[in-house]
Image (cartoon, rainbow, N blue to C red):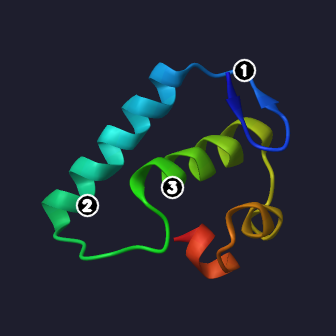
Amino acid sequence: MLFYRACLPLSRRTLNRATRTIAAHRKATGTRWRCLDAAQQALLVLVHLRKGEPFTALTHGFGVSATTAWR
């Protein structure tokens, strides 16, 4: 289980796969830096998709702006 203020019924394998996909995309596009690392970004995306939380609610938990969460 992954945790973000509530239990997410997802496996660690799901998080790892999403993290690898995001990291590969960043490498392919030449992204220099981001506010969140690939694992945190993957968790933010999974929380948004699974729980349907709006980005404004996610910003408090991840410490980023709404624009950053949306991107």
Circles 1 and 3, Cβ within 8 Å, touching? The answer is no
Q: Which residue is mark 3?
A: 41
User: Percent from the top left, x then y, of residue 19?
Assistant: 39, 42
Q: Which residue is mark 2?
A: 26
Tell me the distance, in whole angstroms, between the alpha carbons under discs 3 and 2.
11 Å
Badge 1 marks a residue whose secondary structure is: loop
Which is nearer the N-term, disc 1 or disc 3?
1
Tell me the distance, in whole angstroms, between the alpha carbons under discs 1 and 3.
18 Å
Question: Quick check: 13 left or right of 31?
Answer: right
Question: Quick check: 30 left or right of 2?
Answer: left
Question: What amino acid is found at the position of numbered circle 2 in the picture?
Answer: Arg
User: Percent from the top left, x then y, of residue 65?
Assistant: 67, 80
Question: Quick check: 53 left or right of 21?
Answer: right
**Disc on res. 9:** 1
Tell me what residue is drawn at x 69 percent, y 71 percent: 63
Question: What amino acid is found at the position of numbered circle 1 in the picture?
Answer: Pro
Tell me what residue is drawn at x 50 percent, y 47 percent: 42
